[in-house]
Amino acid sequence: MEDSKLANKADSNSSESTTLSLYVICGALATLILAIDIFIPLGVASGVPYIAVVLLSLKSPKKNFTILVSGICTLFVMIGFVASPDGGQMWQVLANRFLALFAIWTTAILALMQLTREHELYVEQLKNQQVAKDLEIQAEKLKVLKATMRTVQDIVGNFLNSLHIMRLDIETNKSLSQETLDTLDQQVQDTSSRLHQLAELDTVREKQIATDTIGIDYENSTIKK
């Protein structure tokens, strides 16, 4: 139990460390792109590389982080527009900046939609696997139940057959001998012992008790202690 807690704590620390590294990398990359953008004339479409930052942010388990990164990249595009040296015609500059913003948010939205869809499919797959597992467990339980009932029927059936033989013997001899009573008592004890043994099984082994009939090999199965 303690080992499991330590393992979970280690996994949590590792995940937090990976997430922190991702934040640092995204921040550094966005800052680098901004620095380059500031030194490039306005006519050059230098806002598009921010898409790489958005795509990198998708590695974070938090969707809000991608939205935050997209917002920061949008702000950096605006800063680049203000701080970059003059160059090119203004309509081209505005068009480039608009296309950069459009590319950033289109990438972010479509990527998040895809991740959401993949998550939904994953959850649905888990549900289907659980349903299949439950059905398999139910089928196994039903199989054991049927085998148990067949075994009980076999034990009780043997006892009833013995009673029938004793009944014929009594009708033939017109008397109930002590030997017959002793045999009956032994049959009752044996039947009770077998049923008790069947009820106390810890593991189940199957055996064929009749043609195309499978029962429980209670004599060779493990008994609860």
Image (tube, rainbow, N blue to C red):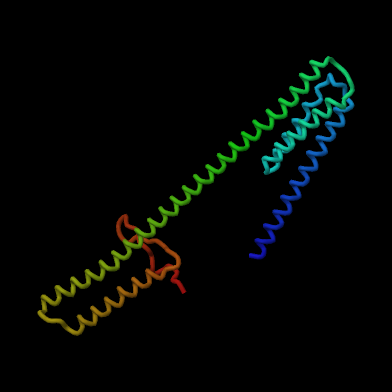
The vertical placement of 43 against 24, above or below, is above
Residue 198: percent from left, percent from top: 37, 69
The vertical placement of 209 against 47, above or below, is below
Residue 150: percent from left, percent from top: 31, 61
> As rendered, which of 171 and 125 lies closer to the eye?
125
Residue in the picture at 55% in, 43% down: 123
> As rendered, which of 153 and 122 lies closer to the eye?
122
Q: Residue farthest to the bottom?
A: 178
Residue 132: percent from left, percent from top: 47, 47
> As rendered, which of 109 and 142 lies closer to the eye?
109
Which quarter of the figure has residue 208?
bottom left
Question: With 167 as the anchor, is 120 left or right in this view?
Answer: right
Residue in the picture at 66% in, 61% down: 5
Which quarter of the figure has residue 28?
top right
Quadrant position of the N terminus in the picture: bottom right
Residue in the picture at 46% in, 51% down: 134
The vertical placement of 88 against 138, above or below, is above
